[in-house]
Amino acid sequence: MKTTNGIDFPSILAFSVHEMKNSLSTISELIQNFAKQNALQHPKELAQLEFEANRMNNSLMQLLILYKIDEAKFCPDIDEHLVSEILNEVLAQQNTLFTINGIDLEINCPEDLLCYCDFNLISNALSTVINNAQRYSKGRILLSAAREDDYVCFHIEDDGNGFPGHFLTQGSADNNTVNLNTGSTGLGLFFVATIAGMHINGAKKGMIKLSNDSCMGGAKFSLLLP
């Protein structure tokens, strides 16, 4: 889409997002320095501030990646990884959030389970979903992974009230059903579905599934990678 003076608007948006990411990086560094000096006075507030700055930075990163995908300028860095290492990275990213909100996260995964994926993209995608799950959880979240048929399946389950009905009809196995125009999903879920679909093995490609079949009684998010 061009502006009235012929400038490419998506390129302007991508440049602006990049500049905002630079500013947020500076803010995060200032927060960390301030926290070292005032940790005993405002521990929870500083931890929350640092987490929110990182969350905004991740959202901007997702926008940049989606822009590059749309411009055919992005290719995932897919390699073989231990799934347990991916889950541990997710835990490291979310530990501050769980501490602040008193969330109990349980991880269940075979130590020798392997997965071909883009490590950073998948760990950030799972962190995005967990970030959302903790808002609706009553205090417990289960992050698990296992091989199921020809897929490595990541599951995030909580003890909340489950997904609303329109989520279950719009966010099923077909990534094309995740439509921002419906207002049924946010950037995070759209990003995860897009990233999943870029993981391809033969005729199979990654997908997401949403249900209310959680063993904890709430919502269940599944990311399937071939």
Image (cartoon, rainbow, N blue to C red):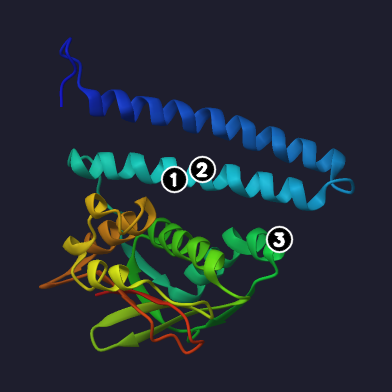
196 left or right of 99 in image: left
Cα–Cα gap, marks 3 and 2: 18 Å
Task: Give the vertical position of 71 relative to 115 (above or below).
Answer: above
Circle 3 SS class: helix
Q: Tell me the residue at 27%/68% (across/down).
A: 171
Q: What residue type is labelled 1?
A: Ser
Mark 3 / mark 2, whichever is N-terminal:
2
Task: Give the vertical position of 172 relative to 27 (above or below).
Answer: below
* Residue 59, numbered circle: 1
Circle 1 SS class: helix
The reply to whether discs 1 and 2 touch (Cβ–Cβ < 8 Å) is: yes
Q: In this figure, which residue is indicated by the disc labeled 3?
A: 100
Task: Give the vertical position of 75 relative to 127 (above or below).
Answer: above
Mark 1 / mark 3, whichever is N-terminal:
1
Q: In which quarter of the image is residue 94?
A: bottom right
Q: Which amino acid does label 2 sit on?
A: Met
Circle 2 SS class: helix
Q: In this figure, which residue is indicated by the disc labeled 2?
A: 56
